Image (tube, rainbow, N blue to C red):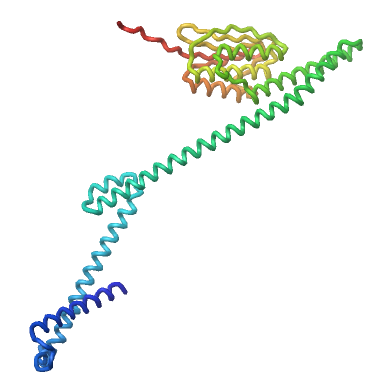
Amino acid sequence: MIAFISRMFTLFITFSIMLFMLLLSILGEPIEENWRFLWDATSNQVPIIAIMLTLLLALSFVISTWMGISLILKENKTTRFVKKIAEPNFSESIKKTSGPLKKALRDANDLIETQRASLQRLATEKVQTNDAIVQERLLAERQRLARELHDSVSQQLFAASMLLSALTEQEQDAQSQKRLGQVEKVVQQAQLEMRALLLHLRPVALHNKTLAEGLEDLILELQEKVYFNIDYQIEEIALSKTEEDHLFRIAQEALSNTLRHAKANEVELLLIARDQLAILRIQDNGLGFDIDEDKTSSYGLRNIAERAVEIGCTYKIVSVPNEGTIVEVKVPLIREEPKND
């Protein structure tokens, strides 16, 4: 409202000065005898000068009103465009405009789109960096726990097992021998549980080895620590790095489940290529379980299934109570097409 009054007053003063200059050029020097008729002459008893000033005031009011409405309309239009800048399809709206506003809006839209893409990229990089940091910290913590368990609990269990073996060799009555044998079995099972836990916490990586080499090293390491026999047949198979890594982790998971739950005395591991398929099979003669009811190995089985799906292969887990368990994964091998001469 203040702007409207100020604008109207400015226009009225401007028009009044223009009228004065016009009269000055027509009537000459503003003396009474030249200008007297302006207030002597009347229309409906209203002096001519008053009518002139009223018309100038009315003209100033009309022009001020028109200017105010035009400014409001332009402001509203600009506000709508500014609000639409954040919309994904704003570039389509720019095409409907013309003139300098179109160029200014296009430049503003390009700048905002660039900033938006930059912010999205930074947000994605931040999430990826945070995930990498979390994974590194988790791995470091698992390695630390594995070292502590190996240096303390695992060594103590080994010492207890050796002491129990020495005691059972001494002359004892039948009842004592039986109890010592039971305790020795418990300690041995605890050792198996500990080794399986260490395998989970500190999994061996391939480290630029092939899958066949990594599996063979893993089996040789386990044979030095477990109380059952591991038979294996391993062939060198051309697989991608991702497939090798996932199959290696699946084998680790299956062997860990065998150590923890199966109470097996024989384990067989196969890695062979047959009929354009790479087949990984881990079989034991342990306790087995009912897949639909027994949840003791559900976490490990879920990991196996997820890894198998990630590399697009088929998997099969078969377990019969008191008979054993079979974990089998089949990866399609890429058949090279013959080249035409």
Q: Is residue 323 visible?
A: no
Q: Residue furthest left?
A: 26
Looking at the image, which residue is at 50% across and 7% down? 273
Quadrant of res 162:
top right
Question: Which residue is drawn at the image coordinates 30% and 47% (left, top)?
Answer: 90
Residue 3 drawn above or below residue 302: below
Out of 151 and 281, give the one closest to the viewer: 151
In the image, what residue occupies the spot 14% across and 81% down?
21
The answer to whether residue 246 is left or right of residue 231 is left
Q: Nearer the viewer, residue 30 or 312?
A: 30
Quadrant of the rendering where the C terminus is positioned: top left
Residue 294's quadrant in the figure? top right
* Image quarter in which the N terminus is found: bottom left
Q: Residue at x 65, y 16 (%)?
A: 258
Determine whether 12 is above or below 302 in the image.
Answer: below
Residue 127 lies, in percent from the top left, at: 50, 38
Residue 235 makes an appearance in the image = yes
Task: Estimate the x, y position of residue 238 in percent, counting from the top left.
Answer: 48, 11
